[in-house]
Image (cartoon, rainbow, N blue to C red):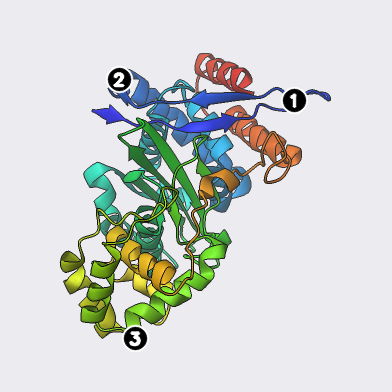
Amino acid sequence: MLHAGIVMSVLPKVTNSAQRTGVANLPLHYGKAPRWLFDRMTKLAREITIAITAEFGPVEMLHRLSDPYWFQAFGCVLGYDWHSSGVTTTVCGALKEGVKGLENELGLFVAGGKGKTSRKTPSEIESFGDKLNADPSKLVYASRMSAKVDSSAVQDGYQLYHHVFVCTKDGAWSVVQQGMNEDNRYARRYHWLGEKVTDFVCEPHSAICTEAAAKTLNLVAVESTPARDTIIQVANQQKPEKLLNELKKLKSLTLPARHSLLLEDIHPDRLSKTLLITYERQPQNFETLLGLEGVGAKTLRALSLISELVYEVPVSLRDPARYSFAHGGKDGIPYPVDRNSYDKSIEILHQALERARIGDTEKLAAFKRLRAWI
């Protein structure tokens, strides 16, 4: 089994006036966590989750999971090596298994997982229905749209293969999902926090973990707003035949090397059915367009090409990951490290360990791993 890893900056706790920094490069690895380790991770994940929800409430657990640095520390404390490539999938798996049977008590529900399990997320959310005070259909929509954004609207070369959706009884939610790039053999982790999402298609992420910049077609960038509007106009106002003819004409153009909107993998004739659907449905905004069944990466890439090359409305090529770390960057970009938030993350994990109902040996080992990480 192939596990994918993260490439991310690890910013240790600031001590005195000095700031120690480092970079963890986590490549793709084969294998999986041995059963003896995963069982212990599940037990500790359950105890930490119980402690956090009891002290701060279930919403705080969503905040923590949407914080990439806390998530990484959580994996270390659970005993999964900080540099191991499967930290995302294994930690999420341990969390899901750990809260099983305690959902009502904790007010916290976990759906999804890796590979085929990720596709069961909607049915798992719906199965929570009678235990929720919120409309499950809205949670299913949030799960679906977060996955569609990171698979189609953010085209960065990382194919999603892991999606975990965590929610509370009252409908607050968080998403942790991961994509794999088979060419560079690294992975990228996407964090979402529902309360921060005011628009699914405009800067919706709480964090994207990576250190390596990618060539990206970024349709959810704020600077892509004019392009999103143009794409909707093109999809609504032009008949599929006209769009296909324009795409065929564009196939003969020679684009500059910097361009990431590649024509060679767009086949106009294969888009005919999808373009007919978009024309008949007349989506009122880009989010509705993105939510249509059959509208995926190639459809959006084709519409983006027409927007830029025919109507001269460019789409952003900015990699969103470079601006998405929760605690800022060591070089002050996009903003200095928020030391108070960073220290709070560590303190919450420390308090959870203090309250965890586990043996002294396991607790001491977990504290040792936490100290090593910070």
SS at mark 3 in the image: helix
On the rendered image, what quadrant is the N terminus found in? Answer: top left
Residue 320 in the image, given as x and y percentages of width and height:
52, 50
Q: State the CA–CA distance, disc 2 to disc 3.
A: 56 Å
| Picture residue at 30% right of the left edge, 62% below the top | 126
Q: Are marks 2 and 3 in contact (CB under 8 Å)?
A: no
Which quadrant of the structure image shows residue 327? Answer: top right
Residue mark closest to the camera, 1 vs 2: 1
Looking at marks 1 and 2 on the same chain, the residue that comes earlier in the sequence is marked by 1
Looking at marks 2 and 3 on the same chain, the residue that comes earlier in the sequence is marked by 2
Residue 256 in the image, given as x and y percentages of width and height:
42, 52
In the displayed structure, would residue 293 be above or below residue 164? Answer: below
User: Looking at numbered disc 1 in the image, what kind of residue is underneath it?
Assistant: Gln
User: Looking at numbered disc 2 in the image, what kind of residue is underneath it?
Assistant: Pro
Q: Nearer the viewer, residue 136 or 244?
A: 244
Residue 209 in the image, given as x and y percentages of width and height:
50, 40
| Picture residue at 29% right of the left edge, 71% below the top | 292
Q: Which residue is mark 3?
A: 237
Which quadrant of the structure image shows residue 255? Answer: bottom left
Q: Which residue is mark 2?
A: 34
Q: Are marks 1 and 3 in contact (CB under 8 Å)?
A: no
Q: State the CA–CA distance, disc 1 to disc 2.
A: 36 Å
Judge the density around disc 1: few (<14), some (14-19), many (≥20) Cα neighbours within 10 Å.
few
Q: Which residue is mark 1?
A: 19
In the displayed structure, would residue 11 be above or below residue 92? Answer: above
